[in-house]
Amino acid sequence: MTEIKEMMLSDILKIQDKVRRHQLIVLSYPVLNPDYIRRDLETIKELHNSGIKLPRVILDQAIKAGNLTVLKYLTIEMTIDNKNIDTAIENDQIQILKFLLSIISCNQKNLCLAIMKHKLNIIKILFEYDICCENDILEFVAEYGNLEIFMFFVEKGALLTDSTLDKACRSDVLIVDYIIRYKKISTLRIIDLLVGNKNNKIITDYLANYLKNII
């Protein structure tokens, strides 16, 4: 009887040890080695089927690694949110992003992140999924984007206002030049911009030279 109890205890300890090792695999899920993650799908399935709750950190790590196979399995029970979309954007995981967008819609924060990161290719993908832009989105692009992204939004019909030019004067001289020429900004308006712009020498010099050439 004692021997049976010892054998049962030994089996229990082995099972507990296996669970602990699996939990360590889950918690230390390698972000930089997609091949390992691919091979480890069976371990994840085994853990899931044994009733162990998988931590959400695996979801982000699968996204960072670009492992669509693992991600699809995880989303059977795990809920996707817009933070996961941010992770895909930050890590340039295009196929992952498209899969996520087939489940949930992106929001303005996702779009603004892509703008700030200057990821035009990702912005184009977000537009493929019918994102609805706020009216002042071009002001954000003028301040945090670049000329290529700015021109893309103009072509998409984004509203270009006086405030857009004011925002551009805080950041990108190429966008300032584009707006002045595209909108045919008046000399008086440019003088106002020059007087009011004290913090960006590159743009101040540009405005001064522009006025010198037209006056």
Image (spheres, rainbow, N blue to C red):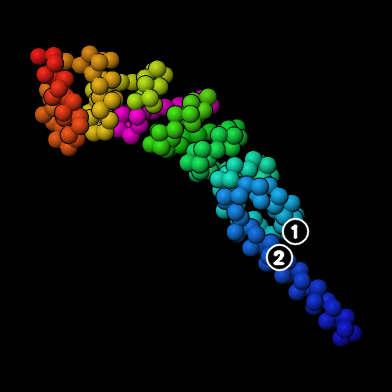
2 or 1: mark nearer the eye: 2
Q: Residues within 10 Å of mark 2 (few under 14, many from 20)?
A: some
Specify the quadrant of the image occupied by residue 49: bottom right
Residue 107 coordinates in the image, percent (x, y): 47, 35
Q: Disc 2 designates what residue?
A: 19
The answer to whether residue 151 is seen in the rendering is yes
Part of the protein shown in magenta? 129-146
Residue 137: say if magenta.
yes
Please, which residue is most extreme toward the bottom here?
2
Residue 176 coordinates in the image, percent (x, y): 25, 24
2 or 1: tag closer to the N-terminus: 2
User: Residue at point 80% right, 77% down?
Assistant: 10
Specify the quadrant of the image occupied by residue 67: top right
> Could you say which is closer to the camera, residue 115 or residue 138?
115
The answer to whether residue 45 is seen in the rendering is no
Q: Amino acid at mark 2?
A: Val
Against 81, residue 17 (above or below) is: below
In the rendered image, the quadrant that contains the C terminus is top left
Residue 43 coordinates in the image, percent (x, y): 72, 55
User: Residue at point 40% right, 33% down?
Assistant: 118
SS class of the residue under badge 1? Answer: loop
Residue 63: say if magenta.
no
User: Residue at point 77% right, 71% down?
Assistant: 14
Contact? badges 2 and 1 (CB < 8 Å): yes
Q: Amino acid at mark 1?
A: Ser
What label sits on residue 106 in the rendered view? Answer: none
Q: Residues within 10 Å of mark 1 (few under 14, many from 20)?
A: few
Measured Cα–Cα span from mark 2 to mark 1: 9 Å
Left or right: 56 as drawn, with respect to 145 = right
Left or right: 48 as drawn, with respect to 121 = right
Residue 143 coordinates in the image, percent (x, y): 30, 32
Q: Disc 1 designates what residue?
A: 50
